[in-house]
Image (tube, rainbow, N blue to C red):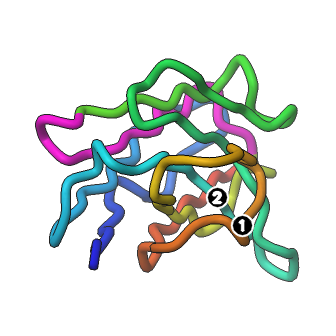
Amino acid sequence: QVQLAESGGGLVQAGDTLRLSCVASGGTIDLYDMGWFRRAPGKEREPVSAIRRDGGNTYYSNSVAGRFTISRDNAKNALYLQLNSLKPEDTAVYYCAAKLSGGTWSPDSTRQYDYWGQGTQVTVSS
C-alpha cells in the first residue's frame, strides 16, 4: 500500500511562490497517475492538477491554469506542484493522491484516487 506525504506548505503573501512536494513510500509511483487537490475552509475538496504516470498528460483546474505547474520524478518517487502568483483564494489544505494507472482517466474526480496524503497547509495573505 502506498503512503503519501506532502510538504512545502506555509504562510506567504499574495504574489509569492511555493513548491509543494509529495513523496511516496511503500510502492513506486511510476504505476500511478497522480493528482493534487485542495480543501479551503468551509468548502468541498476540489481538484487542482493531475498528471499521468509517464508525465505525458496533465490537467489543471481553471482557477490555477497558468499559475501552477505539476511535475513528477518517478526516480525519486516524488510529485511536485509549483505554485506561482499565489492569491488569497488559494488558501487551503493541499493533498496529493494516487490512482493505479489504467482505464479511463478522470483527473478531477476524487472518487477514482486510491491513496491520499494527510495534506499540507497553504495560507496566502493579502
Name the secondary structure under disc 2. Answer: strand
Q: Position of residue 101 (x, y in %)?
A: 48, 49
Which quadrant holds the N terminus? Answer: bottom left
Q: Is residue 118 left or right of residue 16?
A: left
Mark carried by residue 33: none
Name the secondary structure under disc 1. Answer: helix
Mark 2 surroundings within 10 Å by alpha-carbon count, few (fewer than 14), some (14 through 19), many (20 or more)? many
Image depth: mark 2 or mark 1 in front: 1
Tell me what residue is drawn at x 41 percent, y 37 percent.
53
**Residue 102 lies in magenta, yes or no?**
no
Amino acid at dot 2: Phe
How far apart in space, not on screen, are marks 2 and 1 (Cα)?
8 Å
Q: Is residue 54 left or right of residue 51?
A: left
The magenta segment is 74-87
Residue 126 visible to an observer of this rendering: no
Q: Which residue is mark 2?
A: 37
In the rendered image, which quarter is residue 18 located in? Answer: top left
In the rendered image, which quarter is residue 5 located in? Answer: bottom left
Most distant residue in the front direction: 103
Q: Position of residue 111 (x, y in %)?
A: 72, 71
- The reply to whether the C-beta atoms of the residues labelled 2 and 1 are less than 8 Å apart is yes
Number of numbered markers:
2
**Residue 75 lies in magenta, yes or no?**
yes
Tell me what residue is drawn at x 19 percent, y 64 percent.
27
User: Nearest the camera: 24 or 64?
Assistant: 24
Amino acid at dot 1: Thr
Q: Which residue is mark 1?
A: 110
